[in-house]
Image: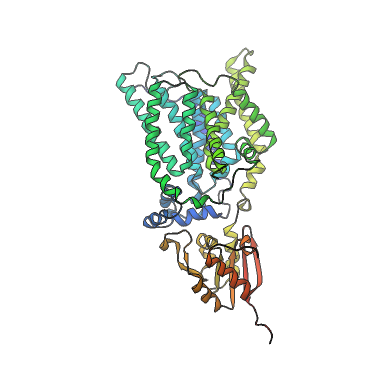
Amino acid sequence: MVVKRPQPSTLVAVLVPTIVMSGIGLWGIDRGGMWRDEAVTVQVARRSLPQIWHLLHSVDVVHGLYYLLMHPVLAVHSGEVALRLPSLCAAAVTAGLVGALGARLARPRVGLWAGLLYAVTPMAGHFAQEGRSYALVAAGATGATLLLVRATDASRGDGGSRARGPGRHAPARHRHRHRYWYWCAYGGVVTVTVLLHELAVLLLLAHAVTLVLARMPRRVWWNWARAAGAVLLVLLPLALVSSGQSDQVAWLGPPGSGTVEDLLRSFAGPTRLVLGPYLLLIALALRSPLARRGELSLPAVALPLLLVPPAILLAVSRHWPLFHDRYVLYALAGAPLLAAAGADRLAGAAGAHLRSPAAARGVATLLGVLAIALAFVSQLPVLREDRNPARRPDDLAALSAVAARRMSPGDPVLFLPAVVRRTAVAYPKGFQGVRDIALREPGPVSGTLYGREVGPGELRRRLDGLDRLWVVAEPYALRPARYPPEPAEQVKLAVVSEQFVPRAEFVRKGSVLRLYVRRPPPAA
């Protein structure tokens, strides 16, 4: 088997975006606070393996593999940097893989531009600093796409410059073995990716569209179908269990009129200086035929990756709301690939009349990098603002700090509703020594995220003996018109409003800490 070493220009196309993405991801990674979803990652991954397994039977099975992967990471250190470091590494790998895809499907400078465009996109930078699974899913999907390209090349017996595998005249048994391992690797990577988040299964449909556009021969379809079938077989038990936990996405609503535009800005760039040229370059890349028979072109790979997963999820969400931009982060890789291909076509047309093609290529590469640097500078305020904890839905660290300053050991505290207990779970030092007045069993023991609370009767008895009470609440939970369906939550509201009056209030983003004292008896 003859294996060609990657050319230096290809290595540059992979390594430079990886380094740039690493730098952008490290900038401000310790922003001083977790938000609610990251807090779930911390509190679940720090449990023992039997406790994690117990939890997944009732909730969050869709993130089960991610929690298991994070368990050894947070066992070493449970700080915010350790929490986000796997996402940062995954984002850096994704940028490098985008560069590798561009270099393989077009040329090294296309890979360099595409990888750098991915790295400077604010959406990529956001999820590089998110202690959740989405950056890992994006890395898996991009890696699987690269493996698809290599596997189809091997299946076609293509040993030309694009195929970095066995030579055209390598022995047949070597080509067969090479092809076999590429398809096995493809199926394995897609399997891990969909187990990290099951909605990534839409990647298979994107790849199917790619094969259709390239009019691949029957043997390629057969190999892909076997790999896809194995993925679906492994995914089936997870899908069956997670369907019984669909309440977890009950907060999602149908996509609105601005959803597509918001997603477009997330993928291509939120500023006008970037968005307009970005879309023009994509349009330029799509002017040429998408593919030739039996060969994967860059547009045939990137366009389905960009469009198919979001389009299907948006269509489904009109009747069964499931759409959120983070669920299709992995589709982002298609946008910079197409924009870089459009820029390459533009550079080729501009340099066609120059006397020195080599010099023209060098100048074009440099100008493309400078244009991406300009895009980065124009989006710098967006990236800087994203590193502010106030940009997240809540700031649990800030609330915990207030609680530590205001509450004393032994003070009773009531969480309204029960999910607000996430603050005390994520930052227990702020609530050290206080009495959780409604808690019966903590989360790790009960196999739940936030523990089980006592029944309405016992809760009323506990509240009746108090002269003062701290309430940690979501702002909506304190509205007079709210009438929660859970009996225990109804008792909380009824007793607090009837028997107590507020004395002091401290508001932090997404949460309220309020001190209540018992209402004085009516005058005789």
Q: Nearer the viewer, residue 498 or 357?
A: 498
Classify the position of the C terminus by image quarter: bottom right
Residue 448: quarter of image: bottom left
Classify the position of the N terminus by image quarter: top left
328 lies above or below 450: above
The residue located at (63%, 33%) in the rendering is 373
* Residue 522 on image: x %, y %: 67, 82
* Residue 355 on image: x %, y %: 62, 12
* Residue 207 on image: x %, y %: 47, 30
The residue located at (46%, 29%) in the rendering is 208
161 lies above or below 91: above
183 lies above or below 456: above
The residue located at (50%, 34%) in the rendering is 96
User: How many numbered marks are there?
Assistant: 0
Q: Nearer the viewer, residue 92 or 315?
A: 315
Q: Residue furthest front?
A: 319
Look at the image and tell me whether residue 94 can be seen.
Answer: yes
The residue located at (60%, 72%) in the rendering is 496
349 lies above or below 390: above
In the drawing, does residue 364 fall left or right of residue 487? right
Look at the image and tell me whether residue 24 can be seen.
Answer: no
Q: Nearer the viewer, residue 456 or 224?
A: 456
